[in-house]
Image: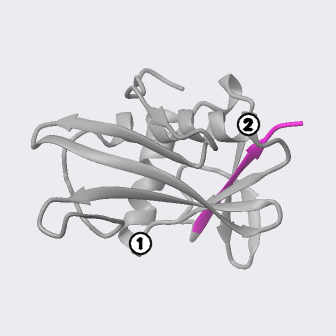
Amino acid sequence: MKQYQAYPVTFDVENARFRFQSIGKRGVFDKIVEFIPISPNIHNLALLDYDLTTNKYSDISVTDNGDMPEVIATVIAIIQRFLDSNPGQKIYFEGSTVARTRLYQIAISQVFDPGDSDLLIEGYKDGQWVLFEPNIRFEGFLVKKKF
């Protein structure tokens, strides 16, 4: 990863739920990354924020905490750990809105260095998966280990 540091993470025994805190201009927010199986070798990644008004985790809340690169660096570190623990698996994710998917793409471009990682990120565009590139609008992302 480029110059951004991942936040400390706690995880469950199955490495399917990871918890960390976003620390930024608006305060401290609890976040969770969950991996939900959607096929035999693909898990959906859900990035959830704890909502104090509902006392539940949500994927539609907006914290605007000014630390998106650090959050994405943390998510990439979590993906790395999950894939290390689950060989042969792939991770799919997209934003809960088109704008959020675009925001993820921008943050990935800032944080992810493909030459310095054993992860491969692909983007979904026009019905096909292509290697991630910073300035292409993707509909979703797939992460897997390089072989």
Q: Residue furthest front?
A: 13
Q: Which mark is residue 42?
A: none
- At mark 1, the secondary structure is loop
Q: Nearer the viewer, mark 2 or mark 1?
A: 2
Which residues make up the magenta segment?
Answer: 140-147
- Residue 84 falls in which quadrant of the image? top right
- At mark 2, the secondary structure is helix
Q: Residue at label 2? A: 85
Residue 119 visible somewhere in the drawing: no
Please state the horizontal and vertical placement of residue 65, each as a whole percent of the image.
Answer: 19, 45
Left or right of 69 in this view: 22: left
Amino acid identity at mark 1 = Ser
The majority secondary structure of the magenta stretch comes to: strand
User: In this view of the protein, which residue sits in the foreground, 115 or 53?
Assistant: 53
Amino acid identity at mark 2 = Ser
Q: Residue at label 1? A: 96
Please state the horizontal and vertical placement of residue 129, each as a whole percent of the image.
Answer: 76, 65
In which quadrant is the C terminus drawn? top right
Left or right of 31 in this view: 26: left
Please state the horizontal and vertical placement of residue 72, each as a whole percent of the image.
Answer: 44, 41
Q: Residue furthest right?
A: 147
Q: Residues within 10 Å of mark 2 (few under 14, many from 20)?
A: few
Nearer-N-terminus badge (2/1): 2
Who's the residue at 73% across and 79% down the image?
127
Please state the horizontal and vertical placement of residue 81, each as a whole percent of the image.
Answer: 64, 33
